[in-house]
Amino acid sequence: MARILVTDDDATTRQMVRGILKNAGHAVTTASDGVAALRAIHKKKFDLVLLDIWMPKMTGMGLLGSLHGEKYIPKIIVMTSDATSDTLLNALRGRVYQFVHKPLEADSLLAVVENALSTSPEIPAIEVLSANKHWVELLVPCERSVVSRVQSFLTHLETDLPADVLEKVGYAFRELLNNAIEWGGHLDPNLKVRISYIRTKKLLMYRLDDPGPGFKLEDLKHAAVNNPASDPMAHMQVREEKGLRPGGLGLMLTKQLVDELVYNELRNEVVLIKYL
Amino acid sequence: MLPEGKTLRILLADDREEIRALTGYQLERDGHQVVTVTNGREALEALERGSFDFVLLDEEMPVMSGAQAAQTIRKNEQGGSRRTFLVALTGNNTDEDQKRLLAAGFDRVLGKPFRIEVLETILAHSDAAIRTGIVPKGQSEADSGGTENLLHRVGGDEKLLRQMIRIFLRDTPKRMAEIQKALRRKDGQSIASVAHALKGSVSIFGAVSAGQHAQELQRLGRHEELDAAKQVYELLKEEIAKLEENLRGYAGRKASPASGTTRAQAPGHKNRS
């Protein structure tokens, strides 16, 4: 059971989120504006805060600003509906843990909440190196939960793209980031992957730079890309023996999902491009 | 998410080998026992041979589709005490598709490619629901007109949904009156702010047109385009009236037998609200 504060000016939304979280066994407090939320945070130690952006008296962004420099800051999940990219980027700088899109839905809300609650507070934060809407650059710890966090944020920057493009690029990015964290960073949260996201009129590009020494494609017995034609699932066996995440299909699928996939010589940096 | 050491028996039907391999592997890694089959017919055969806590059925499969298999499973269960938890995996995940698949007998619908965390959450909470004797969402009433989607959105808790509807019906007339007042005193920012809040709550109930009008009203308010705002307000008013009527209808209807209530509750039990 976690202690969770739900802040939203809409009573229907508050009731919904409160009900879903209570049914999942959590202790829930609600606040209807930023001032009340800040008061609640000062009064009681919460494990998690679910925060709406547009609220009377003090907005969600105002609340994030007020918390800056405090000794204990609970994990914060921002609930967005039409947040601008500036708001999202500021929220990320304000150390927001993850984003969840409105209208909310029980299954995905709970998945995000459980993900946030299961992550140790000791894991280093995501560092924001550049944050304008055409160029976002992040330094992220090599830890599994970081994948859905980064994705929740980046996909919200891209709401103008068609759903199928978002889905394909999202899947490809997720595979590459998983590979970088797992193979490059060996799931060591003290090691970092540098992620660059560049958006122009005609293309969407991701570059991932992992902390590992790189790899040779022919050594990838665990990857579907190297399976003999007679045994397309051979890598599954290898992965099982090595105790690896079942993403070996990733490289093969990823190639089909985007327009370009380019590695550097050492293969510890990769660029993914989708033409728009 | 599941209690340590808790193993679920899961049946997975999908005609594509890579999906069976990937999904099966992920679930096994999380400690579950997984049996995979390639179509609905084989799923039915597997269910005859053994029992499963969860059955995941791809919608489009040769020989027998997921929806056909779900209908048959529900038919076979009639009169018995056992109810299998059925999850549909589908590439067609609009509200209409959800409605259709829930009507076929599925408890949950997951769009593809689904995120394993979402499935884990469903498994964890459905499992908790079974253990505590709270039945997952029951079969939908034929005339419920989309409310099964709403129930799904709130995790199958009918009482919670009714509370939300009550709050919405209480707050919305006040908000509409506030917008009207703001229009009269030509206060664009207040219009934007109230329209924003309204958009949030109507979108929970899946009211697309009302949501779009509220969003447009928010934009017009922000830019102080008050003549246009007045016109959009009238359109919004019509949509809100329709939504309120639907929701009142839902709240007034008797509770469906197994939704968010205990197993002990008799079918046809009238809800107090």
Image (cartoon, coloured by chain):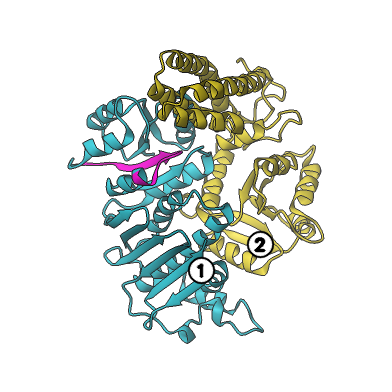
Q: Residues within 10 Å of mark 1 (few under 14, many from 20)?
A: many
Q: Magenta stretch containing residue A73, yes or no? A: yes
Residue B30 visible in the displayed image: no
Q: Quadrant of residue B224?
A: top left
Residue A247 badge: 1
Q: Give the range drawn in magenta.
A: A72-86
- Is A136 positioned to the left or the right of A276 in the image? left
The reply to whether dot 2 and dot 1 touch (C-beta < 8 Å) is: no
Q: In which quarter of the image is residue B132?
A: top right
Q: Residue at x 51, y 31 (%)?
A: B216
- Compare residues B112 and B8 and report the one nearer the observer: B112
Q: Tell me if residue A158 comes above or below residue B78 in the rendering.
A: below
Quadrant (top left, top right, bottom left, bottom right) of the N terminus of chain A:
top left
Q: Is residue B201 shown to the viewer in this render? A: yes
- Chain B tint in image: yellow
The residue type indicated by label 2 comes to: Val
| Residue at left offset 48%, top offset 15% | B180
Query: CA gap, disc 2 to disc 1?
Result: 20 Å
Residue A41, percent from left and from top? 26, 32
Relative to A177, B113 lies left or right: right
The colour assigned to chain A within the rendered structure: cyan
Q: Which mark is residue B35?
A: 2
Dot 2 and dot 1 within a common chain: no
How far from the left and from the top, in percent, is residue A44?
26, 31
